[in-house]
Image: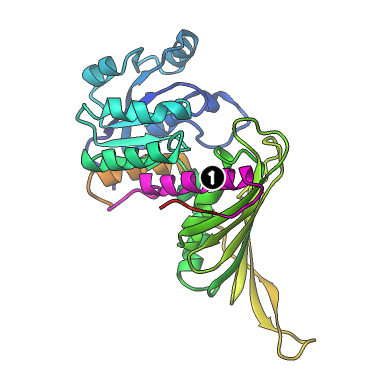
């Protein structure tokens, strides 16, 4: 069931994730906030802010009915959006949220990572809560049917108590890495306690970090970066006392296995493959903005990825980076 009136939505920043990703013909599904708001029956795209004239002109060619402004105040006054997406560089997230707080806003959908540092991220979470604003972070796998299927398997205890997690990602710990950290916390349902990190060559301001993290139940997750962002590998392996689930093919495939009594070794159990039903096909970014609209409308308690969830992923990435600077010395995860 959809709401009677779609929620009015606007975008700040018309770069790749704000708009231009959907111009890449090889990408399947919805990859930009503009397309997500347009395709969701729960939302209506009513305006945008972009300072780059070339980007604004390109957007107007594809969305001629949606006005583009060079000032947030003009956008908020003229368009009165209930939801605003922040799709700008990370260092601008915190000041933009503070600027938005003076307007009668219901929700902010922020790109990841949440903020430039954990202190700003914490202030964003607190400020949004104080103003009654729903703050969501675009860790998109929180709306992906495959990842949600694994989360449900773990919650139901079908894998038993999780004993080990192994994860592989391309690199750039604050970009793709925060997605990885968020998935580990999402699926296990546990809080991170401490980490150890080591830096691979390259990465620049966003380092390629491998290492491990320990969760509050003692489970250890190993993390391996490939050291090159163009190598699209995003894989996780969850092994519990009763079985395992492996997420492969850049998150598109699920492989299951269950522990059974060995026919070769008395007293031992071995893993035997089992079929997992294919998850339903859904467009996760459309699901995300629909989720936001449902929460604002009071039909759902909270969004799948809250500001607090985004803050945990940011703190994990920061702790890994701090540990790598100390040559792998374990660092406690803040909060």
Mainly helix, strand or loop, the magenta region?
helix
Residue density around tag 1, few if under 14, some if 14–19, many if 20 or more, within 10 Å? many
Does residue 282 show up? no
Q: Position of residue 256 (x, y in %)?
A: 63, 66
Q: Nearer the viewer, residue 199 or 172?
A: 199
Q: Nearer the viewer, residue 325 or 38?
A: 325
Q: Residue at x 54, y 45 (%)?
A: 317
Residue 116 vs 326, above or below: the answer is above
Q: Is residue 304 magenta?
A: yes
Magenta segment, which residues? 301-330
The residue at the far bottom in this view is 266
Q: Residue at x 53, y 37 (%)?
A: 29
- Decide if residue 101 is on the left or right side of residue 333: left
Q: Position of residue 300 (x, y in %)?
A: 28, 52
Q: Is residue 303 magenta?
A: yes
- Decide if residue 57 is on the left or right side of residue 274: left
Does residue 194 show up? yes
Q: Nearer the viewer, residue 254 or 142?
A: 142
- Decide if residue 15 is on the left or right side of residue 27: left
Q: Position of residue 90 (x, y in %)?
A: 47, 30
Residue under label 1: 317
């Amino acid at each position: 069931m959809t709401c009677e009136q779609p929620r009015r939505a606007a975008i700040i920043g018309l770069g790749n994730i704000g708009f231009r990703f959907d111009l890449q013909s090889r990408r399947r599904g919805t990859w930009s906030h503009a397309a997500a708001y347009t395709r969701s029956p729960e939302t209506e795209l009513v305006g945008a802010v972009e300072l780059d004239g070339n980007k604004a002109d390109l957007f107007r060619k594809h969305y001629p009915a949606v006005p583009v402004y060079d000032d947030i105040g003009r956008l908020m006054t003229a368009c009165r959006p209930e939801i605003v997406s922040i799709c700008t560089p990370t260092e601008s997230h915190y000041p933009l949220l503070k600027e938005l707080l003076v307007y009668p806003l219901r929700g902010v959908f922020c790109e990841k990572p949440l903020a430039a540092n954990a202190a700003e991220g914490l202030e964003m979470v607190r400020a949004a809560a104080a103003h009654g604003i729903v703050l969501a972070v675009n860790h998109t796998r929180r709306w992906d049917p495959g990842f949600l299927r694994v989360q449900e398997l773990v919650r139901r205890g079908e894998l038993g108590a999780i004993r080990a997690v192994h994860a592989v990602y391309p690199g750039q710990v604050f970009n793709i890495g925060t997605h990885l950290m968020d998935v580990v916390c999402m699926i296990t349902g546990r809080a991170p306690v401490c980490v150890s990190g080591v830096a691979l060559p390259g990465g620049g301001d966003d380092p390629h970090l491998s290492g491990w993290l320990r969760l509050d139940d003692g489970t250890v997750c190993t993390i391996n970066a490939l050291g090159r962002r163009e190598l699209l590998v995003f894989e996780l392996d969850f092994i519990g006392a009763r079985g395992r689930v492996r997420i492969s093919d850049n998150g598109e495939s699920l492989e299951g296995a269950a522990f059974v009594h060995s026919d070769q070794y008395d007293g031992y159990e071995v893993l035997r493959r089992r079929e997992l039903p294919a998850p339903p096909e859904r467009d996760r970014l459309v699901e995300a903005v629909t989720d936001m609209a449902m929460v604002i409308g009071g039909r759902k308690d909270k969004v799948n990825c809250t500001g607090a969830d985004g803050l945990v992923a940011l703190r994990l990435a920061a702790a890994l980076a701090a540990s790598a600077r100390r040559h792998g010395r374990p660092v406690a995860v803040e909060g």
